[in-house]
Image (cartoon, rainbow, N blue to C red):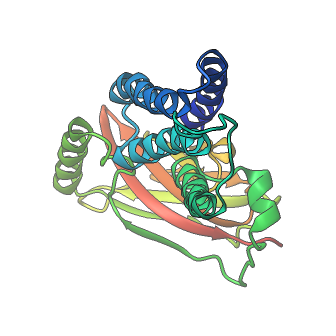
Amino acid sequence: MAVLLPAALGMTIIPILFFLLRWRFPTAGRQIAFILGVLALAAYAPYAIINWPGLDVVAMVAAILVMTAFILGLMSPPKHADSHKMVFHAGPATIIAFFAVIILLDSIFLTIATTGLSENVARQILPEPQGGPVATSYFPGTVAHDYQEKAKQFQAYDAMRDAQDKRGWRVHRGWLGEPVVGQSTPFQIQVLDEAGQPVEGAEVTAHFLRFSSKSLDFTRQLDEVKPGMYQAGITPTRPGRWEIIVDVRRDGETHQLRGMTDVAAH
């Protein structure tokens, strides 16, 4: 959306203004195209600064705006030409079309990388995940999944990590069976303190996050089935890989873990 919206507006408004002004000033087509290109960049600059989407997005939108004005100017005859009808140049048009395709594909890739594929599109173009006989899960450690976003968040994560290391809690987690789409499978967390005693009375929440679509994310509260043991039945909605964020809270303290799991199709 950061690329498509401003680019679509520019590719719509610039030609409309160009043909209106050229109808009024038929001999100044190239001058009009140049002015509109400069004005388009000047109009986009404040928007990009206020809603900064990243240098790659800004460069791509600027290229689209400039190319739109350049194509209109290229098709316009010079002021001293005998005819003031717009002409088509095959050579430059081929070069422009080549770069237009590159910009279009880069815009699509950038949009997918930023927002992900919708579930319907992913189901159409991606192969169906194949579930193995055994569910595989791994937890690389106490890592907050979004600490890179801002320095303030990183500081909070760093403080939480230090607190977790000092607390010395040990967490054992996993499925009590193979997770399969549409079937409820027990997901269990065991929390022990530094002395190996069960951590009782905690609030344990598991967040299941889908890479391809945020709309499929869901959260489950785990109930304490016995001292230090927390469990809930989880029914996955899609096969393939999921990210799991587990939060263990007690007496104002938070213990967070990140993990990955694979869900079988059947």
What residue sits 33% from the left and 41% below the top? Answer: 254
Give the quarter of the image for residue 51. Answer: top left
Residue nearer the viewer, 199 or 102: 102
Residue 266, image x, y percentages: 83, 73
Q: Is residue 33 visible?
A: yes
Left or right: residue 266 compared with residue 158 = right
Q: Which residue reaches farthest bottom?
A: 133
Residue 82, image x, y percentages: 62, 38
What residue sits 63% from the left and 45% below the top? Answer: 217
What residue sits 16% from the left and 51% below the top? Answer: 162
Q: Is residue 237 visible?
A: no
Residue 133, image x, y percentages: 72, 84
Q: Which residue reaches farthest front?
A: 82
Give the quarter of the image for residue 240. Answer: bottom right
**Above or below for 177 versus 242:** below
Residue 137, image x, y percentages: 54, 72
Residue nearer the viewer, 60 or 110: 60
